[in-house]
Image: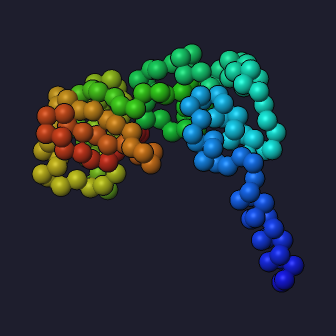
Amino acid sequence: MKKLVFFASIFFISVMYSEVKIEDCASIESDVKRLACYDYLVTGVSKTSEELLESSKNDPKSDYESTTNNSTNFGLSKKQIERSGARVVKNSLSSSISAISKTYGGKTRFKLSNDQLWESQDVLSSIKLNNFRNKNKITIEKTNMGGYWMINTRSNVKIKVKRIS
């Protein structure tokens, strides 16, 4: 037990007095140099800025400009996006409701004018449901934790939704 405590304290002391600290990396303004600093902290191997720039140019997944920004992929899961070979950069979608239906569980399904089908995550009260009728303009926004909000653009009422198809 004493050996474990001794080695753990040696490890933490060496980390505290290491030559590069995470705060140092965070203060670097250049994205490429900041990434190289974080890579060095994690792996212990340092790449030059030129090597990082070349690898990012050769990697098509890291280039947001070369990816499709198509609204047909908005709301798909990560697996579905990987299967389609596209990445979604857009964080919101504007459309209008073309049809509304209820499921047996009491949830509400919304068919949008762009032929996407979305379902409410919760059983909606009649007050909230009145804000989402046919031909209403809506915006669907991605949340920080990976969910989606359907927002009525006129009343700003939000409901949690997920994409069905």
Image quarter of the N terminus: bottom right
Is the residue 19 above or below the residue 93 in the image? Answer: below
Which corner quadrant of the image does residue 149 belong to? top left
In percent of the image, x 13 and y 39: which residue is there?
A: 155
Residue at point 68%, 17% (across, down) = 57
Quadrant assignment, res 94? top left
| Location of the C terminus (image quadrant) | top left
Tag count: 0
**Image check: 55 left or right of 113?**
right
For image coordinates 63% across by 25% down, the residue present is 61
Q: Where is residue 157 in the image (x, y as percent from the top left)?
A: 19, 44
Q: Where is residue 152 in the image (x, y as percent from the top left)?
A: 20, 37
Q: Residue 20, image x and y in percent?
A: 71, 46
The answer to whether residue 156 is above or below residue 58 is below
Q: In this view, does 114 lie to the left or right of 124?
A: right
- The image's colouring method is rainbow
Residue 123 visible? The answer is yes
Residue 119 shows up from this direction: no
Locate residue 21, reporting x and y percent.
67, 49
Residue 91 sits in quarter: top left
The correct choice, above or below, for 55 with respect to 163 in the image is above
User: Seen in the image, is 131 located left or right of residue 102?
Assistant: left
**Depth order, front residue of 25/114:** 25
Q: Residue at x 63, y 44 (%)?
A: 24
Q: Is residue 90 left or right of residue 95?
A: right
- Where is 42 relative to 10, above or below? above
